[in-house]
Image (tube, rainbow, N blue to C red):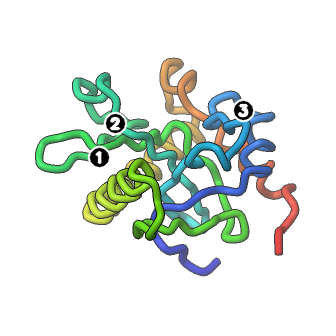
Amino acid sequence: MKPFRFGLYQVDRGYREALAKVDRHVMPVPEDDAETWPPVWILVDFRKRAYCIPVSAPKEKHTAMKNLTDFFRIMEDGKCIGVLNLNGMIPVREDLLHSLELNPMPGDPLEMTQYKNLAKKQLDVCEKSRDTIRKRAVRLYDILAFGWAGPGLVARCCDFRALEQVLREYPQTA
């Protein structure tokens, strides 16, 4: 497997729907990706696997939350600018990933420009924390795969092995 490029991506809609049928913890698929900005994922790879971790916009509740095994706050200058929900990470392969255009384009609505600027900041912070994010992903995967997780953590996380089976069976795209 060639190394994947660390970064922000969108994941194929049909594949996300297939995963959601197997595990209720997979990030919900909006009814129409064209009407909303599709979910953004950060790509990490480890042990010949590639996983995408959902990136969420900052919410008020994130201010007081601490980093946990399955949760990582994206902080800039002491302010939470987003979070990584490692408990919702999903296995991927290259043909299921779509690059994001993070540079504002002429004609982009103000909301889209602001969103792209926030996503660029989130990626910059995550780049600096790349090793930490990767180590957390590996640790969470191992804790769950080897049965070391308590019931609370298991209840919050995707079943990575079941999702890997979906990936193995999912058809390759062009």
* Secondary structure found at label 3: loop
Q: Is residue 46 visible?
A: yes
How packed mark 1 is, by other alpha carbons closer than 10 Å (few <14, some 14-19, many 20 or more), is: many
Q: Quadrant of the C terminus?
A: bottom right
Question: Real-space Cα distance between discs 3 and 2?
Answer: 24 Å
| Relative horizontal placement of residue 110, taking residue 4 as reference (left or right) | left
CB-based contact (under 8 Å), mark 2 and mark 1: yes
* Position above or below: 72 against 60: below
Q: Nearer the viewer, mark 2 or mark 1?
A: 2
Q: Position of residue 77 (x, y in %)?
A: 12, 48
Q: Secondary structure at mark 1?
A: strand
SS at badge 2:
loop
For mark 1, what is the residue? 74
- Amino acid under label 1? Ile
User: In front: 137, or 41?
Assistant: 41
* Residue 136 located left or right of residue 91: left
The Cα–Cα distance between marks 2 and 1, rounded to whole angstroms, is 9 Å
Residue at 28% of width from left, 44% of height from top? 81
Q: Which mark is residue 58?
A: 2
Of residue 133 and residue 10, the one placed in the foreground of this image is 10
Residue 91 occupies which quadrant of the picture?
bottom right
First along the sequence among labels 3 and 1 = 3
In the image, what residue type sits under mark 3? Asp
Tell me if mark 3 has few (under 14), some (14-19) or many (20+) residues whose alpha carbon lies within 10 angstroms of its own. some
Q: Position of residue 161 (x, y in %)?
A: 70, 44
